[in-house]
Image (cartoon, rainbow, N blue to C red):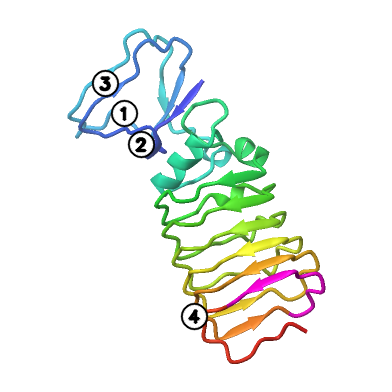
Amino acid sequence: EQLNLVLNSLIGYQPNSGLILSNMPFLNEVCVRELPFPPADFQGILDTTGSPGLSFNLDCRLDSFVYIPDRKFRRALLAEGVDDNQDSLISLEEAQWITNLDVSGKGISDLTGIEAFINLDRLYCQFNKLSGLDLSQNSTLRYLHCENNLLDSLDVAHLQGLYSLDCSENLLDSLVVSGKTDLRYLRCSGNQLHFLDASDNAFLRYLECDNNQLTALDNS
């Protein structure tokens, strides 16, 4: 088994507080940023008692894990049970199993890592602190609720199967949802919209766009 300390923020490693790797008989690889390890400025305690096969190396399999810099997002994913093997890391395989994700109301500022969830059908990320949202790799999304954030732009052009979108109470000044033949529900009120293109949505049943700065609306 391998332990990755390059992603040390995920496991709470701090150079001055010590590292306890005791009683882990099946652990044989510990991936680190540089050798030798521990480094010369290491002031804590390194305890490897009961871990006879342990070795430190630079062979880090980073490409099999999802990079998630926002700790609150990472905690939310762990709470949602995305970490199936409970190693405190989110692997690409674990992310790809997820079709429904609710990380609403967690104080998240950065949703980097969501691109690995390529089979998402529903994403609920409302009531956070998101200023950007890149969903370019999440083309299977049908339900997107990102209301009550700090978004100043939102690109849903590639979400061809979009069925329900709530992006209300953000900072959007334009929104294009044209040609979404599956779109039934659209709520974009409470933004700063000057432009809204909702054309070619023949089956749209609900549209709420009040409290904006619209002077024209194309819903032909």
Q: Amino acid at mark 1?
A: Phe
- Apparent side of residue 105 relative to residue 35 in the rendered image (left or right): right
| Residue 154 image offset from top left, x and y in percent | 57, 70
Counting residues from the start of the chain, the first of labels 3 and 1 encountered is 1
Q: Amino acid at mark 3?
A: Leu
Disc 1 to disc 2: CB gap under 8 Å: yes
Q: Which residues are magenta?
A: 199-209
Counting residues from the start of the chain, the first of labels 3 and 2 encountered is 2
Disc 4 to disc 1: CB gap under 8 Å: no
Q: Secondary structure at mark 4?
A: loop
Counting residues from the start of the chain, the first of labels 3 and 4 encountered is 3
- Gap between marks 3 and 4, in whole Å? 54 Å
Q: Local crowd at mark 1 within 10 Å, few (<14), some, or many (≥20)?
A: some
Q: Which residue is mark 4?
A: 192
Residue depicted at x 52% and y 86%:
213
| Vertical order, 131 against 12 (above or below) | below
Q: Amino acid at mark 4?
A: Gln
Counting residues from the start of the chain, the first of labels 4 and 1 encountered is 1
Q: Which residue is mark 2?
A: 34
| Vertical order, 208 against 64 (above or below) | below
- Gap between marks 1 and 2, in whole Å? 7 Å
Q: Which residue is mark 1?
A: 37
